[in-house]
Image (tube, helix red, strand yellow):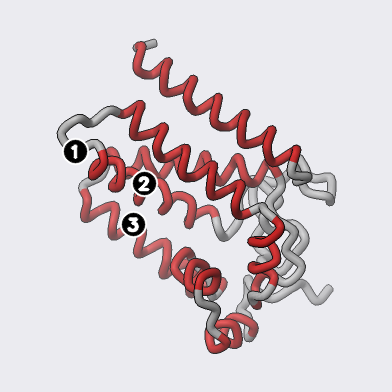
Amino acid sequence: MAPTLRILLLVIAIALVAQAAILFVMGQPPICACGTVRLWTGTVLSQENSQQLTDWYTPSHVIHGMLFFAFGRLVFRGHWSPVLAVALALGIEVAWELIENSPPVIDRYREQALAQGYSGDSILNSLSDTLAMLLGFWIAARLPVRASIALALAAELFTGVMIRDNLTLNVVQLLMPSKAISAWQAEGGVYGAPSQE
């Protein structure tokens, strides 16, 4: 194994262990309270959303990775270092995962139509989000810029149509909540509506 790859894997492992440990101290559950671990949960308004390995918000974290790759290219312009770029991306993503699971941000999310009853991420889901970010970073490192942009836009449009939410709407609703967007989201869709069973 190449020395750079070993260092990258070590940086990733340290970041994930630190993230898990801090979330555990913050009181986030290791896995879904339902006691089951699933690869995917597709119902936004459910107790399993943000608790399983992947969900409708996983594409947002892939987009994070693409954005962080671009940011790293700007920061390390002329002195590109994959280790430093990944460390920067991990630092931003892990910091976000910790902030996102803090009581003030959880309370802010609960004000949104699609986050009623939200209690934060399980540690499993949060770590999966960070791995999804790394996937996005890896994809952006290999694709032409236009292809990365097209993929990010396609993911945003797809999740926007499917659940009336995506990274853009999530950021807007977190920073400047809109009653019109909340009302539109509350109308729901096939995948946004809670089960009536």
Left or right of 78, for residue 192: right
Residue that label 2 marks: 68
Determine which quarter of the picture holds residue 139.
Answer: top left
Q: Residue at x 39, y 33 (%)?
A: 86
| Mark positioned earlier in the residue sequence (3 or 1) | 1
Please name which of the two marks, 1 or 2, marks the residue nearer to the observer.
1
State which tag comes first along the sequence, 2 or 3: 2
In terms of depth relative to the viewer, which is nearer, 28 or 127?
A: 28
Q: Position of residue 31 (x, y in %)?
A: 76, 43
Q: Amino acid at mark 2?
A: Phe
Quarter of image, res 116:
bottom right
The residue identified by callout 3 is 151
Q: Position of residue 29 (x, y in %)?
A: 78, 44
Mark 3 secondary-structure assignment: helix
The quarter in which the C terminus is drawn is bottom right
The image position of residue 81, as x and y in percent, is 27, 28
What separation in Å lies between label 1 and label 2 (alpha carbons)? 13 Å
Q: Amino acid at mark 3?
A: Leu
